Image (tube, coloured by chain):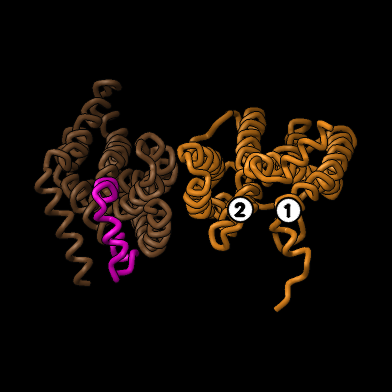
Amino acid sequence: MAPFVTIVLRDLRIAVRRWSEAANPLLFFVIVTTLFPLALSPSADEMREVGAGVLWVSALLSSLLALEGLFRSDADDGSLEQLMLSPVPLGVTVLAKIAAHWLITILPLFALVPVLALSYSMPITALPTMFCALLLATPTLSVLVALGAALTVGLHRGGAIVGLLVLPLTAPLLIFGTRATDLGLHDEPTAGPLYLLAALAAFTLALGPVAIAAALRVGIE
Amino acid sequence: MRLPRWFHLLGSPPFVYGFAGNVAPWLGAVSCVLLAVGAYWGLVVAPPDRVQHEAYRILFIHPQIAYVSIMAYVVMAVAAGIGYVWRIKLAYAIAVAAAPIGASFTACALATGSLWGRPTWGTFWQWTDPRIMSETLLLFLFLGYLALRAAFEDRDKADRVSAILAVVGVVDVPIIHYSVIWWNSLHQGPSIMKLDKPSISPEMLPPFLIMVAAFTLCFFWLLLNGLRGEIVERERDSRWIRQLVEGTRG
């Protein structure tokens, strides 16, 4: 447990010291959610209908932006190699990196989502479901993003290809996430999609680090 | 434990190259004959459907292509996984050969499906249908696999990294299969691949199965040809390839 906390704290400290880099995905999230209404120019009713989908897609895209920092800078300066050589199992290191990524790029979204949801004229009563869905879906998202980052860590320009690899895999999150949010908007029971999101999170958090560790071992040689 | 000799030969590129060259034409010939028989039986002999009339006849093409697209992914993922675990270069070659064929079959399955959907469901494409979506995801997995490989200059690294992606993507295979059971889908439930008696008319079953065999053999025919090309590409600096080329020239 101690190495896990150490790595998380280290990544958080780096993020705080390079805060402008960490802030970019958040800014991107805000800008994308602003562009959608400009492009669609919908009425308030339509805004409410598309709002959930827009917020989910924007969250997916903004978390992709942050993936360069996940392993790349550590791989470039050699600290990732040191982490891999240490006696800590690589899976634990990977989980710590994922946790740090989640804290840096996803957690601040929770502060932005209520503001944006209100600007999309979504009722406040829908917010708890939205938070639950985001809370359950985003760990899976972080694992998938980390997988994309690990698969391309050996490439110097892997940015474009990561989207191609990761975005299709996020389809289930998008489906169940927007489904839960929609049901919440219409005051219907939301347990079904939320359970499925929780199951996905358990599945990916358990098996994802194994695949990510394997990809890192190949990428760093 | 002593392994039989043929098992070791399976790891030898010249042997597999020659073996694939000998077997592939037979697979191709049988596949073409079965395709012709199945197409005639299905399109002409089999009776028209009570509900869908003549439009149902794509039943003898679309499910088979979709099934082969999933099988192609399984072949690719298993081969890539074997290559990753035991470091067998030929297994990687099989995975690489399977990817473009699988991608084509997936694209054909989506195309024939949407052609079938127009007269029967009244729409070419239904975004909310889970089976269409999971099949589309399969296409993206194939394309992602190929794109990831293309991004690496070092073939050895490309083999191993793309193998991880291929194995991760296997989660989509059960989703495609069970999508019609788990969710409300426009697609019908399973009618052949179940423990119970098949719920297809007995007059339609033989051409259906003939076409399944035909497309399966067709896939392996294409796979062996692709594998031969991939082996030549990988072994182009080795002596036996040079001798082979000089033999055909001389």
Q: Colour of chain B?
A: orange
At a point 25% along the width and 42% down the height, the residue shown is A66
Element at badge 1? loop
Outermost residue, left direction?
A17
Q: Is residue B108 above or below residue A109?
A: above
Disc 2 crowd rating (10 Å Cα; few below 14, some 14-19, many 20+) is many
Residue drawn at 60 percent across, 42 percent down = B99
Residue B51 placed where, x, y %?
74, 37
In the picture of the structure, the residue carrying the numbered disc 1 is B192
Chain ID, mark 1: B
**Residue at the disc numbered 2:** B89
* Front position in the image: B45 or B88: B88
Q: Is residue B60 left or right of residue B138?
A: right
Q: Is residue A102 visible?
A: yes
Between the C-alphas of marks 1 and 2, the distance is 37 Å
Q: Identify the amino acid type marked 1.
A: Ile
Q: Is residue B114 magenta?
A: no
Quarter containing the N terminus of chain A:
bottom left
